[in-house]
Image (cartoon, grey):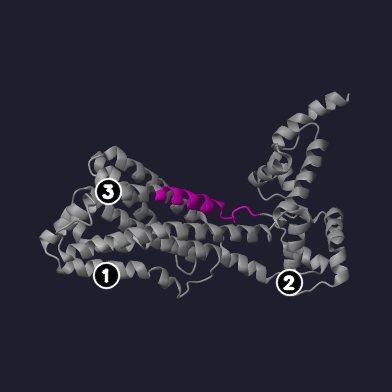
Amino acid sequence: MLHHIIVLTPVYVSLFWALVLLCNRYSFNRPRFWLGIFMLMAACLYGSHALYFSGAVQAYLRVDFIYVFSALSVYPLYYIYVRLLACDVRLKRSYAWHLLPAVLLSLAMFLLSSVSSQDEKQMYFDVVLVTQQFPAPGLPGIVRGMAVVFLLTRFIFGFQVIYYLIRGYWLVRKYDQRIANFYSNIEGRKLLWVRMLTISLFLASIASSVANILGRGLFLKHDLLLAIPSGIFSTLLFVIGFLGGKQDYNIRALKQDEEEAPCDTKPGESKKNSLKADLLESLVRENIYLNADLRICELCKKLNTNRTYLSNLINDEFNLSFSDFINRYRVEHACRLIEADADGRFSLETIAAESGFGSVSSFNRAFKKEKGITAGQFRRKLPEKSSRLN
């Protein structure tokens, strides 16, 4: 009973999220729908694993080509999901190239398996998959061919783990920088969770690759060993499905917002020399940072400049993103409110809203980042300051 729970948990988790995510309309949220396809492929992959580790040899051998296809598809599909979140508004034909190794090697395994005898299939399972004695003398040509496909699958899979996860992390990082340089309130827009999970997937996959080098046969009789990768990947798949299902904002919405912003206005030389001063004066005089949904395009209109130039000026002159730059003014405004509220009548939620923050959580993060302490700690230190002055 315990053994079946261990081998089937990743299948149940990925299949559950596949059904949930694929129920969404493709046109409504393309990344979410594509994440459902990724989960469906993960269910196929771990379903093949379940047959192997349950000792269903004949059933596994009949679907070995599916294992090859799903193993070589799962990380390209995750990468395509990340691209649809972070940089591509729609699917591209070039995505098909990422799945070419999966198609070719699974087709080769299917053909070799179709022309092999039952004894040859059993020899392939015992010698190559369980004991990993390949190359071994005396193996029939068919078995050698299946072993070559298996080894190529392992090699390409290892390459995919490194390439797609690192590449995906880089794309999300660029997207998050783009978000922070356009919006002052980035709550629910950044993909920090994708970056963290990508790192976790990378580390877990490296550990899984090491286990594969040692041989899957090592896990056949050790449920506790098998429970480790099963628990890790079940947890990661659940978190990816849960957070991915909640992620509404993506590159499509960002590009729509960017199209509303002026980006063709070219400031003259005199404007370049005075833009920094005009920016600071505008923030102090008009308190525009109190607008919780402030976007860089609104400042561009006031200063008669373009989005790229203003963003670069803030990055270079203040070494901050647009979001952090605006939040610095909001934090200072919050400090003044807290200091003026000696009796503590206003809650931190009220102060956050009055200072232009979209939520208390974003207020707390920005305050801690700017001041090194939380807003609550800042407030508690005020009486100490007053007593020392007296």
**Does the magenta run of residues contain 189?**
yes
Residue denoted by label 1:
107
The image quarter containing residue 188 is bottom right
**Which x, y percent locates residue 263?**
72, 72
Residue at position x 88%, y 24% from top?
A: 390
User: What stretch of residues is rendered in magenta?
Assistant: 186-206
Residue at position x 46%, y 65% from top?
A: 80
Q: Amino acid at mark 1?
A: Leu
Q: Residues within 10 Å of mark 1 (few under 14, many from 20)?
A: some
Classify mark 2: helix, strand or loop.
loop
Q: CA distance from mark 1 to mark 3?
A: 23 Å
Q: Does any portion of residue 80 appear in the rendered image?
A: yes
Q: CA distance from mark 3 to mark 2?
A: 57 Å
Camera-nearest residue between 301 and 164:
164
Classify mark 3: helix, strand or loop.
helix
Camera-nearest residue between 299 and 346:
299
Marker disc for residue 216: 3
Q: Amino acid at mark 2?
A: Pro
Location of the N terminus by quadrant is top left
Classify mark 1: helix, strand or loop.
helix
Nearer-N-terminus badge (1/2): 1
Majority secondary structure of the magenta segment?
helix
Q: Is residue 154 left or right of residue 354?
A: left
**Which x, y percent locates residue 217?**
24, 47
Nearer-N-terminus badge (3/2): 3
